[in-house]
Image (tube, rainbow, N blue to C red):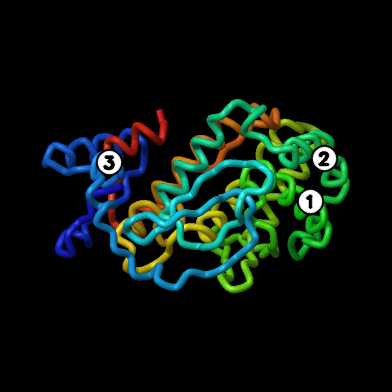
Amino acid sequence: MAEEFPPESSRSFQVPRTIQALENTVSRQSDSGFRCDCDIHSPYIYADNKCTEHDDDTIGPFCMFMHPSRNSWGHFAPELTIAPGKPKLETLRFEALQLAKACILCFDRPAQTFLSNMQVGAVYKFMSFPWEHLAGNPGGAPSGPDTGNLQQPIERLIEILSTIFFFGAIKKFTIRWTSDRNGFAVDRTTHICTIALDAERIEAHMRTLPHDAAKAKIGIVSAVLRALLDVFFALLGCTGEKCTTRVSNLGDNKRARAWQLVAVKLEEVAPRLLRVGVDLERWEALAEWMGRHRMLPSNHDLACYCFG
């Protein structure tokens, strides 16, 4: 994704505060001959990737949407063909950018071929989702949100949105009510995903449902989709320390290039399917990635992220 700053200059690295400032900084860095490390501009990085983290293939028959085939450099290549009888997922070792592009290809298909019968059913369930249950149970105990009131309806919403947009890959999950956006986790043995959601933010949206339902739905759906996208890449993306594309494409917070590209597509597709706008807070995710890794995206990345 990015230009990595040498150790001697890392102390002076500052995350640009605005999109315009980032564009100016990236443009100056690009003038020095920086080359984007995506698979389009630097295909040799991917062809030479001998990721030894992938020697131990974990069997996980929990996902019905991928037909994995090993490529020449150790990762598995995702093939998103939603159809009955396709082989189940047999590995957790997908190179993050290739996983993202497979998702995007799927989302770009016409709805009648993009959606399976299960996904169509989930869309109908979303359209009939009982938002009044959320509006009528805001909790609001003086000591903090009453997550007991949130648990069941939010679990149902997670199941619906996971089926529509993540192909049923996230089958087993628990909710961690926390303000820590990075409080999510994945158990690669049991495939149980811990989804991090901020109860106070959810409740704040719930309280506006009777007065501004459209805005409240945007806030709640966006929060759930962000959390699902986090665990999707944590579950299926390659996290190996020796994986040469991990930092640029996945990142320590799982919100690097691959996350950004799928998030852009979700913000485009979700409103058409759900009739609800979506804001996945992509700028905040990018700023966190830059701060964590002291790196910048490329000009090509910024064009793909469509921040303008």
Residue type at mark 3 is Ser
Q: Are marks 1 and 3 in contact (CB under 8 Å)?
A: no
Residue wearing tag 3: 298
Left-right relation of 212 to 248? right
Examine the image and state in which quarter residue 305 appears.
top left
Query: Which residue is the site of mark 2?
Result: 129
* Residue located beneath label 1 in the image: 156
- In the displayed structure image, the side of residue 50 where residue 143 appears, left or right: right
- Location of residue 298 by image quarter: top left
| Pointer 2 or 3: first along the chain | 2
Question: Dividing the picture into quarters, in which one does residue 283 lie?
Answer: top left
The picture places residue 202, in percent across and down from the top left corner, at: 70, 50
Q: Secondary structure at mark 2?
A: loop
Q: Residue at left 69%, top 62%? A: 172
User: Whole-Å distance between the Cαs marked 1 and 3?
Assistant: 39 Å
Residue at 29 percent of width and 35 percent of height: 300
- Tell me how far mark 2 sits from mark 3, CA to CA: 41 Å
Q: Does residue 269 appear left or right of residue 163 in this picture?
A: left
